[in-house]
């Protein structure tokens, strides 16, 4: 199911093929930098760049003997290159290659996540514009509160997605670092100038200081950004699930022709996409916890983080990519029922305007405590006697002695309640400049 919605490039980024491609990219960039510095023969660097290649099956065959993936990789490449391969991996330790190459993968994957976020934000904005004035009841504690619009609910999603963009952009910058400082980070065999040259050629920043590895607080921050993004999607999906309940029936995720909801009950139209998103968010949170555990390593490095990252990085990026793309389809295709929203708003017989009546009484000199008592007693009668709240107020001598009928009527005016919706939209939906993504515009 995840493969169906995942961007094919996301799987490619985390494939064995691409992992070894990035390793070779770092190895050849290091050789080029050393050739420019006169450390290795220029012809050897050129030879490795021209002839450097690998065969995954051969790497795996060698690794069965060496039990070391980088040695298996360099051995397999050396077989393709020939004599010039004696300069391959010169002055480097394994983590110089692995960590720098992994930074390239994480940067690529972040770029896809940012594209996904931009597509989702555009879909949310389109539906928000469509439902700017679609009136519904707001709920707090699951109970009717005051009227709002479905567009305002979607504007809130958009603003949160903009914050998710900012977090991913920040995390992308934090992990886009390389290191070639050797076995304990002291540059014992290559100078900082070589590291700076290699990182510049790869578009990375050199780590200011490292041990044998790039420090894993960076990776934890990235995983946190993915986990928060997943939690945002969970929040939105949970809202759709709640609104799709039969008793509410206000919003429904798309249900395709030929789709089946239950093997036993032909009538079922279940929010399976939203439920899947909620479930996957739990997985990403667990992976973020594992990333935090990876930060504390023995001395200058152990490999307890390595096995974890081989799972949590590809799995998390692939899952979040899937979640974003699938939820974009949900938002674009979700069915909204304005009539049902209005019907549900009216089910509470007008008590949701009690706050406005309270304020109007206070504005005319009634103490807040007295006004609250008058309004609440009529609201409770409306609940228990199933009577219209406005009619009860109009028949209450205490209330009408202060508020004329016209003012009571005005307190129930939806246009008055929603008069600032346009102002909310103006604050949230910043105009997108030509060539600028929706996410970038919202962040700024």
Image: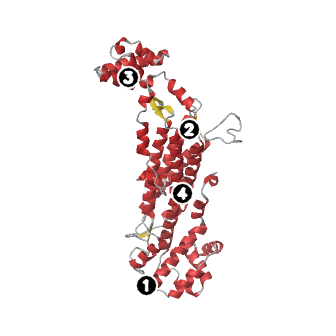
Q: Which of the labelled discs sits on residue 317, or is there none?
A: 4
**Are there few (<14), some (14-19), or many (20+) residues within 10 Å of tag 3?**
many
Is residue 269 depicted above or below 358 in this figure?
Answer: below
- Choose between 342 and 38: the one closer to the eye: 342
Q: Nearer the viewer, mark 1 or mark 3?
A: 3
The type of colouring in the image is: secondary structure
Q: Secondary structure at mark 2?
A: helix
Mark 2 or mark 3: name the one nearer the start of the chain.
2
In the image, what residue occupies the spot 40% across and 36% down?
Answer: 420
Q: How far across and down, in percent of the image, does residue 79 sit? A: 62, 82
Q: CA distance from mark 4 to mark 2?
A: 24 Å
**Which numbered disc, 2 or 3, marks the residue closer to the eye?**
3
Along the horizontal axis of the image, is 402 left or right of 160? left
Query: Spatial distance from mark 1 to mark 2, Cα to Cα?
Result: 61 Å
Q: Between disc 1 and disc 2, whose residue precedes?
A: 1
What residue is pinned by disc 3?
A: 357
Near mark 4 (Cα within 10 A), the count class, few <14, some 14-19 or many ≥20, is many
Residue matched to label 2: 241
Q: Nearer the viewer, residue 265 or 362?
A: 362
Q: Is residue 187 visible?
A: no
How far is the residue under mark 4 from the one under mark 1?
38 Å
Check residue 313 in the rendering and tell me which mark sits there, or answer none. Answer: none
**Mark sitting earlier along the chain (4/3):** 4
Q: Is 222 located above or below residue 63 in the figure?
A: above
According to the image, label 1 marks what residue? 37
Query: Marks 4 and 1: which is nearer the front?
Result: 1
């Amino acid at each position: 199911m995840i493969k169906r919605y995942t961007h094919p490039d996301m799987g490619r980024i985390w494939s064995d093929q691409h992992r070894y491609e990035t390793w070779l990219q770092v190895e050849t960039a290091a050789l080029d930098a050393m050739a420019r510095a006169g450390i290795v023969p220029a012809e050897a660097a050129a030879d490795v760049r021209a002839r450097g290649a690998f065969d995954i099956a051969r790497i795996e065959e060698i690794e069965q003997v060496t039990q070391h993936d980088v040695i298996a990789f360099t051995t397999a490449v050396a077989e393709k290159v020939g004599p010039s391969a004696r300069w391959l991996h010169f002055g480097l330790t394994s983590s110089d290659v692995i960590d720098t190459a992994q930074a390239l993968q994480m940067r690529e994957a972040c770029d896809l996540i940012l594209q996904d976020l931009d597509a989702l934000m555009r879909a949310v904005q389109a539906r928000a514009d469509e439902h700017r004035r679609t009136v519904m009841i707001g709920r707090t504690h699951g109970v009717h509160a005051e009227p709002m619009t479905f567009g305002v609910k979607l504007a809130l999603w958009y603003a949160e997605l903009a914050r998710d963009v900012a977090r991913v952009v920040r995390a992308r910058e934090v992990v886009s670092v390389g290191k070639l400082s050797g076995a304990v980070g002291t540059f014992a065999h290559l100078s900082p100038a070589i590291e700076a040259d290699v990182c510049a050629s790869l578009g990375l920043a050199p780590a200011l200081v490292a041990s044998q590895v790039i420090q894993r607080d960076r990776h934890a921050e990235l995983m946190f950004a993915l986990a928060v993004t997943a939690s945002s999607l969970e929040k939105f999906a949970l809202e759709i699930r709640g609104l799709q309940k039969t008793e509410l029936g206000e919003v429904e995720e798309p249900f395709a022709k030929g789709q089946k909801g239950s093997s036993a009950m032909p009538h079922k139209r279940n929010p399976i996409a939203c439920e899947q998103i909620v479930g996957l968010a739990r997985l990403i949170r667990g992976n973020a916890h594992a990333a935090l555990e990876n930060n504390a390593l023995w001395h200058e490095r152990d490999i307890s983080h390595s096995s974890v990252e081989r799972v949590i990085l590809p799995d998390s990026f692939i899952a979040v990519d899937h979640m974003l793309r699938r939820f974009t389809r949900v938002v674009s295709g979700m069915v909204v029922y304005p009539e049902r929203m209005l019907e549900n708003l009216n089910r509470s017989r007008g008590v949701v305007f009690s706050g406005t009546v309270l304020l109007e009484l206070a504005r005319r000199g009634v103490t807040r405590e007295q006004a609250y008592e008058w309004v609440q007693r009529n609201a409770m009668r409306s609940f228990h006697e199933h009577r219209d709240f406005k009619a009860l107020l109009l028949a209450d001598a205490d209330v009408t002695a202060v508020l004329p009928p016209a003012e009571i009527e005005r307190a129930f005016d939806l246009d008055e309640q929603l008069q600032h919706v346009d102002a909310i939209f103006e604050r949230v939906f910043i105009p997108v400049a030509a060539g600028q993504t929706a996410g970038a515009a919202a962040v700024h």
